[in-house]
Amino acid sequence: NSPRTRSCVYSPTGPCICSLGNSAAVPTMEGPLRRKTLLKEGRKPALSSWTRYWVILSGSTLLYYGAKSLRGTDRKHYKSTPGKKVSIVGWMVQLPDDPEHPDIFQLNNPDKGNVYKFQTGSRFHAILWHKHLDDACKSNRPQVPANLMSFE
């Protein structure tokens, strides 16, 4: 085992932690995000509003911790146990080029038809989340054996 190297990034818009390495016990990325559901099982939800979460990406799993109060961006302002735990292997992440909303990224689950929009608070954090989520979405994806024929 090699020693773990950790780099931390802080900004006025809220904490954001990046860790190097692939241990599932140590978060790859975490911080306050706002989430909005765009599609649920391929359909537009009747009501969709922004919801605040402390989100932890650990390996290829996203953990959502609900907000305890209306304000606050520190970890202490969010619940101590996750309300939701989701594997994102096989999902797709997009970073729209929208000058009016530079702090947005989208996460799509093509198997279930779910699409979520996330707001990070800064373009820098949107890019960081996109990079780490993209790696996580592609991790542990079953590889097609080389001895199979391709019809492309």
Image (cartoon, rainbow, N blue to C red):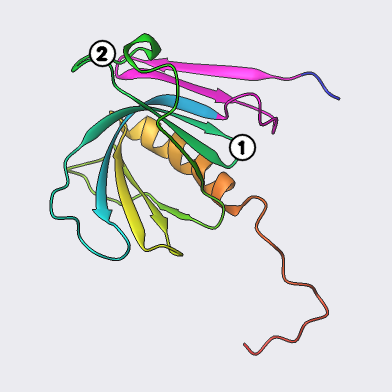
Vertical arrangement, residue 49 with respect to residue 18, above or below:
below
Residue drawn at (64%, 50%), measured in percent from left and top? 139
The residue under label 2 is 72
Front position in the image: 2 or 100: 2
Asked whether, in this view, residue 47 is left or right of residue 139, the answer is left
Name which residue lies at 30% across and 66% down: 42
Give the residues in magenta. Answer: 4-28
Image height check: is 59 above or below 2? Answer: below
Q: Residues within 10 Å of mark 1 (few under 14, many from 20)?
A: many
- The structure residue drawn at horizontal position 59% and vertical position 18%, both measured from the top left corner, is 7
* Coordinates of residue 117 in the picture (x, y in percent): 29, 46
User: For residue 68, what is the image quadrant?
Assistant: top left
Give the residue furthest to the top. 76
Q: Nearer the viewer, residue 75 or 152?
A: 75
Q: Three-letter amino acid code at disc 1?
A: Gly
Which amino acid type corresponds to the residue marked 2 in the rendered image? Gly
Confirm whether the magenta stretch covers residue 51. no
Mark number for residue 118? none
Image location of residue 89, percent across then percent down: 56, 52
* Distance from the alpha carbon under mark 1 to that under mark 2: 26 Å
Dot 1 or dot 2: first in sequence order is 1
The answer to whether residue 17 is left or right of residue 53 is: right
Which quadrant is home to the C terminus?
A: bottom right
Task: Identify the disc placed on residue 59.
Answer: 1
Q: In what quadrant of the picture does the N terminus appear?
A: top right
Name the foreground residue: 54 vs 112: 112
Secondary structure of the residue carrying numbered label 2: loop
